[in-house]
Image (cartoon, coloured by chain):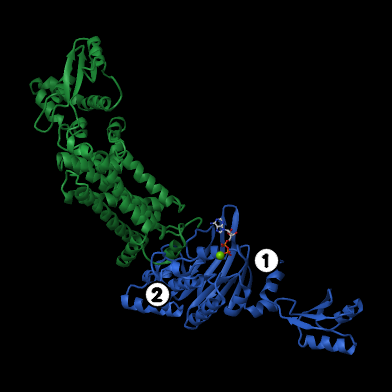
Amino acid sequence: MSNIISIENLVKRFGEKIAVDHFSLHVEEGEILGLLGPNGSGKTTTINCLLSLLQYDKGDIQIFGKPMSPDAYDIKSKIGVVMQNIAIVDTLNVYENVDFFCGLYINDKKTRQQYVEEALEFTGLTEYKKYKPKKLSGGLLRRLNIACGIAHKPKLVLFDEPTVAVDPQSRNAILEGIRKMNREGTTVIYTSHYMEEVEELCSRIVIMDHGKNVANGTAAELKASLKNRETIRIGIPNLSDDIIHQVKEINHVYEAVRDEDNLLIRCDGGEHNLVHILSFLSDSNIPFGHVSTEQPTLNDVFLAITGKELRD
Amino acid sequence: MFGRIFIYKFKALIRSHWLIGWNFLFPLVLATAFSLGFGNLIDDDPISFHTMDVGYVAEEDSTFLTVLETLSKSTDEREAVINLHTYNSEKNAKQALADKEIDGYYLLDSEDIHTTVSENGIVSTTLLQIVKDYKNFQTTIKNIAIDHPENLESAVELMGSDLEIIKQHSFGHSNSPYLQYFYALLTMTSLFGSWISTFTLQGMCANMSERGKRFECAPGHKFKAIAAGALAGILIQSASNAVLVIYIVTVLKIDLGLNLGLILLITTLGSALGITAGTFMGALLKKPVLLVAVPMTYAMLCSFFSGLMVASIKQYVQYYVPFLNKINPGAVMSDSLYIASNYGLTREFYQDITIMIVIIIIHIILSGVILRRRNYASI
Ligand SMILES: Nc1ncnc2c1ncn2[C@@H]1O[C@H](COP(=O)(O)OP(=O)(O)O)[C@@H](O)[C@H]1O
Ligand SMILES: [Mg+2]
């Protein structure tokens, strides 16, 4: 495995505002690296610096082991980009759009034709070939945006929130497509503020907040860093302080609090926590109603690190 | 890559209905309006210049008189510019001016030549221009007067054709000055090309559009791409000019006084001028809204100063800021049409063509400097 992207201490200011703050990132060949952060955390700015579209104040960026610059054409030729906003030519139809952008990379006519057809197939746009963009729905436009970004079969693809405002069906198709590309050897950077998506897709996740790299690892690793591993909620009609006190004594329970008629119990690891708690309640003849249990999410990770929710 | 970008830019442009509609139809509408306004004048009044009656009062001998005498003779190429009246005192000249016997007079004292006219206007500009021309040649004329007084008259006559005043007016030529409006119109149409290329650049610059960002991520040489886009633009703009010329000649039945090939050559060069100007603007501008406003203002201003709305504006500029007429692409282009139609392919004509080519090259170089290896502080 070799290092495909290396960003060291990137700083980007817009006037007084620091959009990217000493951000470092390393991406290895074959990864799907998820860049997760709330809106305004600096994901797009980082991507734009990475592509040398933006000047930056400090830092060092290398792609494929070479320094990136506006005229590093050999590097650019191996990158595919799917912009956050739709980046297509309104006056060209679907096929022409893909062919136009693919043509910026692939000169051979036959190869290009094949690549364009494949990209249309890949994004499910073959039947819309002759459509003008303004005739396409939002989801189809997103797919066209993707087709234009990846048709030239790049070794590295940057996806900047490709599923924003996309219907669930298109969204699943997009994620499945990215997985397929990755299986065929493409390295992927995927930015999003949807934690479920990132968790589902990415082999490694970097959490970004206020332009900083605040956490980094697989989803499991990130969650393992949390004290809370399991949250159990039990409806208890006659909940007394005494019961709460006794539950707190159970192994691995580090917090038990009242939430209206519910008892909210947080555990810091261990197995079969629910079984232990329920057998305690039965043994003590305490009646209880519904029971639910939650595993921590990336939102909890984010909450633990930044003190705020990932999504407002 | 060049060929493909060219083809796609061409496609994208001709499918931009607003742009095509404006660039092809607006000039036709204006041409029709011009033709309704004074189309008949072009036929009825081919010679609009009338020899001016000019008074002359001198306290002492001056070579200026030789120049005035030369201008008051008609030649094979032109009729007399002025009709000279000599007075022995300013009082008489003033009286003659008041009686409208003369349009204006020159008073020479030991210091300077003073020009007096009854009202400001084209006569005033013309008379002032004569003095200015004379001053340009004054040293030469004085030297000849000292060394070879016998040759003075023929020397001045030879210089006569070099005088701006002669170049500026078609004294007695068969082409109507109303044609100037149509030359200015062709100029305006050519300069509209600047709008086409700011539009093209919008799709190629990351600070202008999303597709510009996407475009700049690609490995292609920016300059090659822009050249391809510019070529597509020139083709479309030249076509728009050709349509206009053919419309004027065949539908409006106005003789532009030039052969078709030459007009199309000049308008194509003009289109290249407009297109490269737009490329330069597109490279310079940062806000997408300006991409329409700036080229439109540019085209309108340049053609205004080349006489699109007021034909005599060019003569005023020639007197007050002659330099402007040499750098205003609109003035240069309409001048080249004007000179070619009235005097043929003279040195002045080639000078105009050269200036146009130089401006085009400057546009290209400046755009290249700005766009090369560019990344942005903010997008
Ligand atoms: N061109 C710009 N000028 C000023 N501020 C900007 C500009 N682009 C982005 N920002 C600011 O930088 C921060 C990061 O933005 P962005 O990278 O777009 O975040 P994300 O992609 O994570 O939503 C935001 O606070 C945003 O307002
Ligand atoms: Mg973003």
Query: Please, is residue B124 above or below residue A129 in the view?
Result: above
Q: Position of residue B53 (x, y in %)?
A: 19, 21
The residues tagged by marks 1 and 2 sit, at their Cα atoms, a distance apart of 39 Å
Label at residue B343: none
Disc number lying in front (1 or 2):
2
Left or right side of B269 for A307: right
Chain A appears what colour? blue
Specify the quarter for ligand 1: bottom right
- From the viewer's side, name the closer residue of A37 and B293: B293
- As shown in the figure, which amino acid type bears the numbered disc 2? Lys
Q: Position of residue A285 (x, y in %)?
A: 90, 88
Residue tagged 2 = A129
Is residue B82 visible in the rendered image? The answer is yes
Label 1: chain?
A: A
Chain B appears what colour? green
- As shown in the figure, which amino acid type bears the numbered disc 1? Asp
Q: Position of residue A101 (x, y in %)?
A: 39, 69
